[in-house]
Image (cartoon, rainbow, N blue to C red):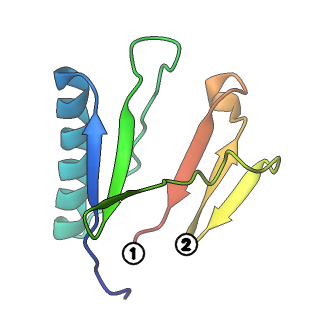
Amino acid sequence: MNEMETRRYKITATREQLDILETLFKTMESMGNAGSSRAMKLFVDGDGAFHPKFEKFEKGESVKLTSLVANTNEDTIKHGYGYIQKNCEEFNGDGYYIYYDFG
């Protein structure tokens, strides 16, 4: 099992969007605590009202976040024990399917 570490982020979004993200995080935490496996889906409507801002902090300083999908033309990006599938047909060929085995 990988060693745990703590990271600090600042997320700027609407109150309702932050509540939804917190629910997503707590659901992931409770699945881990219960030893339960579940698939979770998140739809992001970027041309709608969802335009969150994420800022990562290390040693009190803001650092640049990088995207696994922004700098590649590959359809499948392998990452750790999972992958990100671009151009997912489930989202009319315009989405990402993210699979990660946290176990």
Q: Which is nearer the eye, 1 or 9? A: 9
Query: Mark number for residue 81?
Result: 2
Q: Which is nearer the eye, 42 or 17? A: 17
* Residue 88 position (above or below residue 15): below
Q: Which residue is mark 1?
A: 103
* Residue 18 position (above or below residue 46): below
Q: Residues within 10 Å of mark 2 (few under 14, many from 20)?
A: few
Element at label 2: loop
Given the image, on which type of amino acid does mark 2 rest? Tyr
How many numbered markers are drawn? 2
User: Which residue is at a point 28% across and 70% down the rendered structure image?
Assistant: 59
Left or right of 101? Residue 38 is left
User: Which residue is at a point 42% across and 35% down the rendered structure image?
Assistant: 42
Q: Do labels 1 and 2 touch, CB within 8 Å?
A: yes
User: Which residue is at a point 43% across and 38% down the rendered structure image?
Assistant: 41
Given the image, on which type of amino acid does mark 1 rest? Gly
* Residue found at the very far right of the displayed protein: 73
* Residue 58 position (above or below residue 26): below
Query: Mark number for residue 68?
Result: none
Task: Tell me the distance, in whole angstroms, between the alpha carbons under discs 1 and 2.
Answer: 9 Å
Q: Residues within 10 Å of mark 1 (few under 14, many from 20)?
A: few
